[in-house]
């Protein structure tokens, strides 16, 4: 087994908010915006990985605290 620690940076805010929105809508999980940065990066990374590669993402924090920030950004 290979363990890789993923450090992300430079993910554009629109991608972060879209990942926040997508996970909330599809899975009913409201991620924290910090977790959404990792989600946005994984959306870019996953298509480049070998078929069958397994990933584990730890969703930490309380995304319900970030809902108002996302609403302001999305202007809904």
Image (spheres, rainbow, N blue to C red):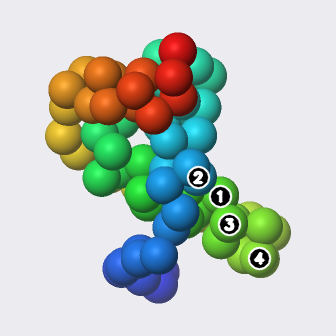
Q: Earlier in the sequence, mark 3 or mark 2?
A: 2
Q: Name the residue under label 3.
A: 44
Q: Earlier in the sequence, mark 1 or mark 2?
A: 2
Query: Which label is found at residue 15?
Result: 2
Distance, label 1 to label 4, CA atoms, is: 10 Å
Front of the two marks 1 and 2: 2
29, 49: nearer the viewer: 29
Near mark 2 (Cα within 10 A), the count class, few <14, some 14-19 or many ≥20, is: some
59 to 43, vertically: above or below: above
Labels 3 & 1 near each other (Cβ < 8 A)? yes
Q: Which quadrant holds residue 59?
A: top left
Labels 4 & 3 near each other (Cβ < 8 A)? yes
In the rendered structure, the answer to whether residue 22 lies left or right of residue 4 reads right
Residue beneath the point at 42% across and 57% down: 37
Distance, label 2 to label 4, CA atoms, is: 18 Å
Distance, label 3 to label 1, CA atoms, is: 4 Å
69 to 59, vertically: above or below: above
Near mark 4 (Cα within 10 A), the count class, few <14, some 14-19 or many ≥20, is: few
27 to 19, vertically: above or below: above
- Expressed as whole percent of the image width and height from the top left, the position of residue 55 reads 53, 62
Q: What element carries label 4?
A: helix
Residue 63 visible to the viewer: no
Q: Name the residue under label 4.
A: 48
Distance, label 4 to label 3, CA atoms, is: 8 Å
């Amino acid at each position: 087994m290979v363990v890789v620690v993923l450090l992300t940076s430079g993910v554009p805010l629109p991608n972060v908010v879209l990942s926040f929105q997508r996970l909330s809508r599809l899975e009913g999980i409201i991620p924290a915006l910090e977790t959404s940065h990792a989600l946005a990066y994984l959306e870019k990374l996953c298509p480049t990985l070998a078929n069958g590669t397994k990933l584990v993402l730890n969703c930490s924090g309380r995304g319900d605290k970030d809902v108002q920030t996302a609403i302001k950004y999305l202007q809904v």
